[in-house]
Amino acid sequence: MAIPVATLVLFITIMLSGNYLKQPLGTEDNVPEAIEGIIKNVMQDNWGEVETETENLEAAWKKVVGRIQFSLERDEINYFTTNLARLQGAILARDKSSALIELKEAYNHWENLGK
């Protein structure tokens, strides 16, 4: 049974669109901007704002995951999600060093999504 060309083209397009689909479509799904804001607040020991911005980052990530889940490898998505979970632990402990490590690693995973 042959696969129709249109189906094959659609499948290839979806698989190669991850880098494009991760880009923000508005202000509520701008993951890199959210990470940078959290880093600034961690550096200033503004933990209340860090908690709020981390919730915003998680909401933005959920929106992006909805767009990229079929075009990127599951491991890549899981790495970023794991960083967010560990970041929450660092925030609960008010551990500045660990929070910054997780944020920088999450940003690195973000940069490499779709490459």
Image (spheres, grey):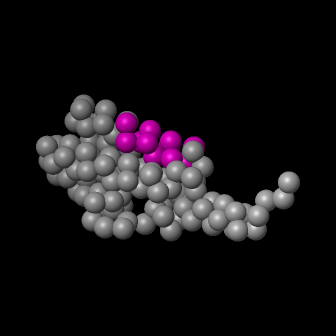
In the rendered image, the quadrant that contains the C terminus is bottom right
In-image side of 29 versus 2 (left or right): left
Of 94 and 89, nearer the camera is: 89
Span of residues in magenta:
75-85
Where does residue 32 sit, x and y in percent of width and height? 36, 61
Residue shown at 27% from the left, 65% from the top: 27
93 relative position to 5: left or right: left
How many marks can you see? Answer: 0
For residue 36, say whether it is visible: no
* Residue at 41%, 55% in the rendered image: 64
Q: Is 82 colored magenta in this rendering?
A: yes
Q: Please, what is the dominant secondary structure of the magenta stretch?
A: helix
- Residue at (26%, 46%) from the top-left corner? 54
The quarter of the picture where residue 40 lies is: bottom left
User: Which of the 4 quarters of the picture holds residue 47?
Assistant: top left
Q: Position of residue 19 (x, y in %)?
A: 53, 65
- Return the residue nearer the eye: 8 or 102: 8
Using residue 31 as the reference point, say whether residue 115 is left or right of it.
Answer: right
